[in-house]
Amino acid sequence: MKVTIIIFSLIIVWTGVVKAQQMVDGIAAIVGQEIILNSEVEQYVQNYVLQNKINVMSNPEMYKSLKKEVLEKLIEQKILLTKADEDTITVTEREVDRYLDEQIRTLIARAGSESALESAFQNPMKKIRRDLRAETESRLKIETLRRKKFAEVKVSRREVEEFYNMYQDSLPVLKETVDISHILKQIKPGGSSREAALEKMIEIKEKVDAGEDFAELAETYSEDPATSIRGGDLGFIKRGDLVTEFESVAFNLEPGEISDIVETQFGFHLIKMIEKRGEKIHTSHILIHLQPTEDDESRVIEELEAIRQKSLDGENFEALAIANSDDENVENDKGHLGTWEVDKLAIPEFKKVVANMEVGEISEPFKTDYGYHIVRLNLHEEPRTLSLEKDWDKLQNMALNFKIDNEYKSWIAMLKDDIPIEYKISSD
């Protein structure tokens, strides 16, 4: 069984099964001047077992095989780090921070909350972050080394054809795919509902201007349940964490300053700047939601029906998307959502709608969590095998990866010859 283990794999919340198998400290292998502990091997095996829900209790041979493959991967990582240091490969603090932030967010999502993650690691977030930082830097150095090593590898037309002829019987079958475009209209409150929400926020703003405590007003009036219990505190954010309308105002406030009323897709806000720290800001807010009515929903459906008819009458769908869609990416993609495997369409409503469409057809308006859409089916491909005529780019990429993988294995074997490796546990 081939197992791909990345040293910076996701850390899993340990269960009773893991606790029952106490790790025994000791050296598993020595790679040059670096050591690999038994506990490291056990940890990564357990991570893989839990992530993939493998029952190794009933298959001890599988567990033994996993340990062997993990140990070889850890040895490989040590060798590559040694080579990266020899080649003076470096990564910037900004790169490390960006990848580390992404990893921390993933871990928190897996654990369920920041406090749950701290409990799982039995450490505060500062220590978790500090411990993971070194691993992140090592992983990025290895990725940079590999990228530089194989950047110039190319495949000729003959190599692609030879790869296809040799492996065509084992190449994956392309699943059913669709190429789709859409126009999105969000359900935005208007008329009396908007006026009522704005009037409520104006009254709160008057209380703020009169000197009443912002946090107490947030607790009393804010309609953001996640923050109102904390006096509206949003914690530290960086650009891109929140919607543009909110950030464009918030990042221009000075500590202690309170904004005028700000309107976003979520409603009306008052924003208070608490602290600035480099490229991050610490803010709190008061939110009054805008609540759409049935009339607002009906208006959106009518607008989309009119847009659909314009397209059916010959107007350019992409131009209509740019002029009317509320999708934040519409200026760049002109409403084009790309090619998707049908069974991987993440939004169930999309999957249901495209299943009954013909190429070139434009759907009637339908609702998702994002609002109302109309979808155009640009292309529909039934499941099929790969061919040189239709799938040259895919096959070229496969052949390139195959070639790089073979060259990588040869390179690692050569590096292993140059670095002494001493096994302290059996690798058989």
Image: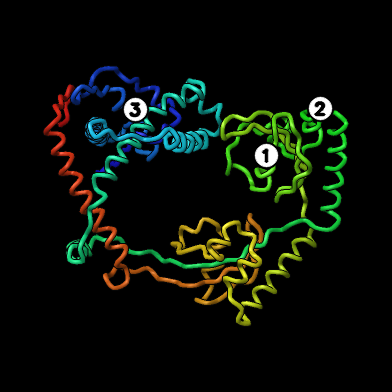
Q: CA distance from mark 2 to mark 1?
A: 22 Å
Cβ atoms at labels 3 and 1 below 8 Å apart: no
Q: Nearer the viewer, mark 2 or mark 1?
A: 1
Q: Identify the residue at the far bottom of this view.
A: 313
Horizontal side, residue 16 vs residue 285: left or right: left
Q: Earlier in the sequence, mark 2 or mark 1?
A: 2
On screen, residue 112 above or below 341: above
Q: Nearer the viewer, mark 3 or mark 2?
A: 2
**Looking at the rendering, in which quadrant would you find the C terminus?**
top left
Q: Earlier in the sequence, mark 3 or mark 2?
A: 3
Report whether residue 55 is seen.
no
Which numbered tag is attached to residue 252? 1
Q: Residue at point 45% right, 62% down? A: 340
Percent coordinates x, y for residue 200 in the rendering: 85, 43
Cβ atoms at labels 2 and 1 below 8 Å apart: no
Which numbered tag is attached to residue 43? 3
Which numbered tag is attached to residue 244? none
Q: Would you call the spot at circle 3 few (<14 residues within 10 Å), some (14-19), or many (20 or more)?
A: some
Which numbered tag is attached to residue 213? 2
Q: Residue at point 55% right, 65% down? A: 334
Q: CA distance from mark 3 to mark 1?
A: 46 Å
Horizontal side, residue 147 vs residue 122: left or right: left
Q: Amino acid at mark 2?
A: Asp
Where disc 1 sits, the SS reads loop
Q: Earlier in the sequence, mark 3 or mark 1?
A: 3
Q: Nearer the viewer, mark 3 or mark 1?
A: 1
Q: Would you call the spot at circle 1 few (<14 residues within 10 Å), some (14-19), or many (20 or more)?
A: few
Percent coordinates x, y for residue 83 in the rendering: 22, 33
Q: Amino acid at mark 3?
A: Gln
Q: Quadrant of residue 57?
A: top left
